[in-house]
Amino acid sequence: MKKRFVSTLLCAAMTAAMVSGCGSGNTSGGSTQAAAADTGSKKEVVIWDYFETDAQKEMMTSLLDGFNSSQNEYVASHVYVPFSDYEKQLTLGIASGELPDLVILDGCSMASFISLGLFGDISDADIKWDEYIQGPMESTMADGRHYGIPFATNCTALFYNKDMFDAAGVEYPDENTTWEQFHEMAKALTKDGVTGFGNAATNTDEGTFQCLQWLYTAGGSYTDIKGGIKAYDLMQEMITDGSWTKECVNWTQSDVNNNFIAGNLAMQQNGPWQIPGIAKDAPDLNYGVTVLPKMDDASGQATSILGGENMGVVAKDDTAGAVAFLKYYDQTQVMVDAMKQYGSFPPKTEAAKDAYWTDDPIQAEFITQLETSIPRGPSASWPSYSSAIQKGFQEVLTLSKTPEQVAEDTQEAVDAVK
């Protein structure tokens, strides 16, 4: 799946170079309030999301406004549910029947919720299925049937503060940077209240998304924990000498980026969705992006983990409104405009050809990183795998167990997942 996804995305890039409870809870965005006040005889389409950044919220407002003004039959609104509670609320909603019409969710979670019956089969919808990048599209499917469409696709890479590197006389990281060199950079930059490196290692799948790539780069996988034990060694060495912030176990990706903008971190692991926020909140920040460090000179480019969201249609007697919203988003220009605001890559091949991604040097680094990005799973049991894996990272990063003991215990936990 990885190779097919990367091949499609890179072909798109090269082509461009030649000629990225229902009705309850806290809502966000002017569109939601305006829609609620002007439903009239229109049918409501309620969407759940967990978007945190201002850019993501503004994107959702624009998307809803565009859909609502494009037709007269439906009015769409959205409900914000915190990421940490998202899957719990979906599970409770399945039991209670209090669910929205559409769910925007992490792509790796969709398989498990399809198996739980949350999503309805929309294979007969008038959607251009074959125009999507294969990897993301397959994450919305089960047994050859369609339950939604990809919303965004992305990965993480390494952001670095150029001014801090220059002041310390340290060379910038690049595609040849090894873990040893990365560690030395982080140590040299850890001073005067600044920590060399930070990522999001919070005890949710958001933390798994950011930490798992280190395990893969070391030679492990989500089912082969012991094979990646060198990642645990690196983490504990850097936590011990203070060059990898110990606060990472409590930080979301937004927290990490906020600390990078504030000058508390010299390097951060994060995704392209942070770029619009940096441009808005810190337009003078002199930073660069490169691929994540590789383990040693003998290994190839480090992997990253394929991220992004899907839009799933909740199984109901009437799914016409939800499908209408998918068809609106299925339009190439609508998707391009939304992903420019959102800070991610479009999952549709034609949309990914836009020069906004292929011609920008920072965005282009993420395209390079996508070459070795791999999905979490895919597995209908992914939540159980993720929970076991992230518990292990928490134990490593808090120094509560040795790398050897964490590897043993985590391997046992993932082996027990059915």
Image (tube, grey):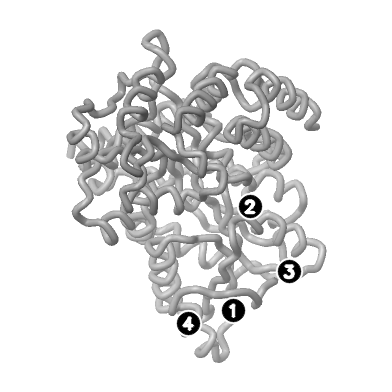
How would you rate the neighbour count of disc 1 (Cα within 10 Å): few for under 14, some for 14-19, many for 20 or more? some
Q: Which residue in the protein does label 3 denote?
A: 317
Q: Which residue in the protein does label 1 denote?
A: 44
x, y percent for residue 97: 78, 68
The amino acid marked with disc number 1 is Glu
x, y percent for residue 118: 72, 56
User: Which numbered dot is residue 346?
Assistant: none
Q: Which residue in the protein does label 4 denote?
A: 72
x, y percent for residue 261: 32, 52
The amino acid marked with disc number 2 is Tyr
Q: Residue at x 56, y 56 (%)?
A: 311
Q: CA distance from mark 1 to mark 3?
A: 14 Å
How would you rate the neighbour count of disc 4 (Cα within 10 Å): few for under 14, some for 14-19, many for 20 or more? few
- 71 or 164: nearer the eye? 164
Drawn side of residue 287 relative to residue 316, left or right:
left
Task: Check the image and report above or below for 110 versus 314.
Answer: above
Of tags 4 and 1, which is closer to the observer?
1
- 324 or 17: nearer the eye? 17
Drawn side of residue 87 relative to residue 201, left or right:
right
Which quarter of the picture shows residue 16?
top left
Q: Looking at the image, tell me whether mark 3 or mark 2 is earlier in sequence order.
A: 2
How would you rate the neighbour count of disc 2 (Cα within 10 Å): few for under 14, some for 14-19, many for 20 or more? many
